[in-house]
């Protein structure tokens, strides 16, 4: 048999549980949003690092082509035609291919980071929603128990 005091305690307990569930859901959402921001920052860093690496590859190609021209010119070859031009074209072509592949790789890693961030944000929203649902469930369950106790108490009098 439920007394007025026990019913009041159940109501307070249900309210505290509901507040706790809501707070927990919010904290989980905040943590997921923080992780999402980190994943987005990592994605931007991946893309930036790939662009820097691509520029280094292009710079090395310019250096290598300059050294090849210098060696060819030193041996008396006209660097403005024929084989000398083919060598330079080959050096630049291979370097550009490496640079573009580096950028593509960085962009791919960045897209995966952005997808991870989106997933984390979704997970946070779901955690918040679960907190609200748990709070609602706690309140309804306590309300049902209190109502049953009230019904039993009023029949007994």
Image: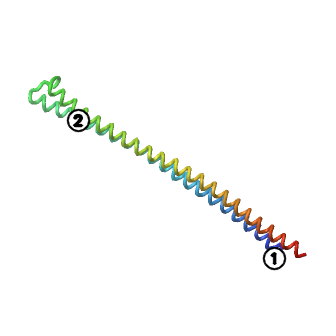
Look at the image and tell me in which quarter the N terminus lies: bottom right
Q: Residue furthest left?
A: 75
| Residue at point 29%, 39% (across, down) | 98
Is residue 93 rendered to the left or right of residue 38?
left
On residue 1, the disc is 1
Tell me if 157 is positioned left or right of 73 in this view: right
Residue highlighted by disc 2: 63
Judging depth in this view, the residue of 116 and 41 nearest the camera is 116
The percent position of residue 99, horizontal first and vertical second, equals 31, 38
Q: Residues within 10 Å of mark 1 (few under 14, many from 20)?
A: few
Between discs 1 and 2, the one toward the N terminus: 1
Residue found at the very far right of the displayed protein: 157
Indicate the position of residue 132 as horizontal and vertical percent values.
Answer: 67, 57
Identify the residue at image location x=74%, y=62%: 140
Pointers 1 and 2 in contact (C-beta within 8 Å): no
Q: Nearer the viewer, residue 96 or 151?
A: 151
- Of residues 57 and 143, the one drawn nearer to the viewer in this rendering: 143
Q: Quadrant of residue 143?
A: bottom right
């Amino acid at each position: 048999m439920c007394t007025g005091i026990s019913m009041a305690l159940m109501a307070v307990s249900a309210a505290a549980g509901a507040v706790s569930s809501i707070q927990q859901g919010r904290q989980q959402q905040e943590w997921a949003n923080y992780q999402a921001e980190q994943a987005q920052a990592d994605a931007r860093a991946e893309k930036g690092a790939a662009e820097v690496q691509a520029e280094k590859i292009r710079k090395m190609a310019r250096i290598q082509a300059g050294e090849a021209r210098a060696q060819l010119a030193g041996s008396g070859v006209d660097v403005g035609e024929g084989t000398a031009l083919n060598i330079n074209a080959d050096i630049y072509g291979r370097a550009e291919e490496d640079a573009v592949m580096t950028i593509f790789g960085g962009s791919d890693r960045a897209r995966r980071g952005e997808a991870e961030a989106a997933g984390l944000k979704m997970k946070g929203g779901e955690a918040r929603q679960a907190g609200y649902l748990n709070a609602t469930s706690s309140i309804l369950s306590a309300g049902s128990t209190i109502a049953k106790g009230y019904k039993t108490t009023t029949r007994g009098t």
